[in-house]
Amino acid sequence: MPRVALHGEGVADSPVPLVVNVYTEPEWRGQGIARALMSTLMDWAVVQGCERVVLHASETGRALYTSLGFTATNEMRWMPHRQG
């Protein structure tokens, strides 16, 4: 059965898209797949006029995102409609 090399998801219906999951299977890492996905998303965000793109990076992904121009922040967020 074919395997998925990379999985990504996010929320794009906002002026600030949120990337919530980017995961590359271990055997496919280091081949530029996540970089290609993120570069495509960043190009799309520019065309859409997005203010910025937000994501929470794991230690594994931090170097990739930094190399793409993302900067670390101490973001905190309150979402009243998602309270449990």
Image (spheres, rainbow, N blue to C red):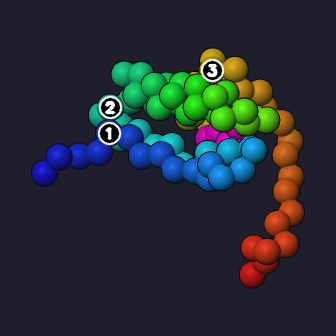
Residue 5's label in the rendered image is 1
Q: Earlier in the sequence, mark 3 or mark 1?
A: 1
- Between circles 1 and 2, the one closer to the viewer is 1
74 drawn magenta: no
Q: Secondary structure at mark 2?
A: helix
Determine contact: label 1, label 2, CB under 8 Å.
yes
**Quadrant placement of the C terminus:** bottom right
Label the magenta part by its dominant secondary structure: loop
Residue 69 rendering spot, x and y as whole percentages: 69, 20
One can see residue 56 in this view:
no
How far apart, in angstroms, are the residues tagged by discs 3 and 1? 20 Å
Neighbours of disc 2 within 10 Å: few (<14), some (14-19), many (20+): few
Say whether residue 67 is left or right of residue 76: left
Q: Amino acid at mark 3?
A: Leu
Which image quadrant is residue 80 in?
Answer: bottom right
Neighbours of disc 1 within 10 Å: few (<14), some (14-19), many (20+): some
Residue 68's label in the rendered image is 3
Which image quadrant is residue 29 in?
Answer: top left
One can see residue 3 in this view:
yes
User: Which residue is pictured at 32% across the width and 31% down the height?
Assistant: 28
Residue at numbered disc 2: 28
Q: Amino acid at mark 1?
A: Ala
User: Which residue is pictured at 13% across the width and 51% down the height?
Assistant: 1
How far apart, in angstroms, are the residues tagged by discs 2 and 3? 19 Å
Q: Earlier in the sequence, mark 1 or mark 2?
A: 1
Determine contact: label 3, label 1, CB under 8 Å.
no
The residues colored magenta run: 53-58
Neighbours of disc 3 within 10 Å: few (<14), some (14-19), many (20+): few
Which image quadrant is residue 19 in?
Answer: top right
Q: Earlier in the sequence, mark 2 or mark 3?
A: 2
Residue 42 rendering spot, x and y as whole percentages: 61, 29
